[in-house]
Amino acid sequence: MGRTLVSAADIRDAPPGDFVVPAGALVTPLARDLARDRGIQLVEHGGGASGQAGHSGRTGSASGGSASGGSGSDDLESHVRRLVTTMLAADGGSGGPRAAPKVVDHRTVVMEPFGFPGPGPDQQVHATDVVTSQDGSPVAAGYMTLTAGKFPWTLTYDEVQIVMEGELHIGTKNGTLIGRAGDVLYVPKGSSITFGTPSWAKFVYVTFPADWAG
């Protein structure tokens, strides 16, 4: 059975003070950062503060759907740390020139039809890479938009999605992850999921390795 997801939207709507995290809930990294910025204490149900000092208080109402299985946010953090360590090791051992800083103006990005099978005829999916291995980067990044519907996908790479507009639904065997504007989702390598939305979604994806389609 899936776990509750506490997203940045929950913290954004919460008043100052304590926010009690439901038992077994997964708190997204963006939600933790926003709570720290707003001076909100994240207090685990039946326990102490989650990543911050605090005491018992108001129970949070999580709006983010169900999270996939695992032993909690510590597992997620550990996995991301291992991923970053692997990326840094790969970059340091390449022997090639380091990538130069780059900025992408999202207003100038031209979206292209998604070039892979999966979406049905009634769903419009567009995507484009804006950071690739040609930039000397160990990770790739790009934009994707979806209209109503969903399609299956199996990841042969690790991916983070940052929702810009609308509502992104990531379907897993343990439930559905729901991300809204400002939320961050993470899907590990080897996951078989569905990408979907009830209406519209635009998000940034960041993948490792950069040559995810290769």
Image (cartoon, rainbow, N blue to C red):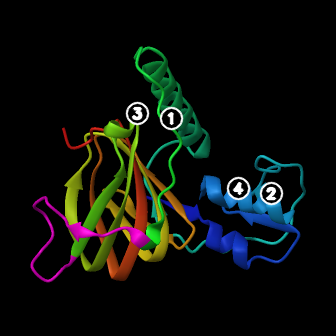
Mark 1: few/some/many CA within 10 Å (<14, 14-19, 20+): few
Type of residue at label 4?
Answer: Arg
Q: CA distance from mark 1 to mark 2?
A: 22 Å
Location of mark 2 (residue): 36
User: For numbered disc 2, what is the local secondary structure?
Assistant: helix
- Marks 3, 4: nearer the viewer: 3
Mark 3: few/some/many CA within 10 Å (<14, 14-19, 20+): many
- Marks 1, 3: nearer the viewer: 3
Mark 1 or mark 3, which has the lower sequence index? 1
Q: CA distance from mark 3 to mark 4?
A: 27 Å
Specify whether residue 46 is painted magenta: no
Location of mark 3 (residue): 138
In the rendering, at what x and y percent does residue 86 appear? 46, 24
User: For numbered disc 4, what is the local secondary structure?
Assistant: helix
In the rendering, at what x and y percent does residue 199 appear? 34, 85
Q: Quadrant of the N terminus?
A: bottom left
User: For numbered disc 1, what is the local secondary structure?
Assistant: helix
Q: Which residues are magenta?
A: 108-124
Q: CA distance from mark 2 to mark 4?
A: 6 Å
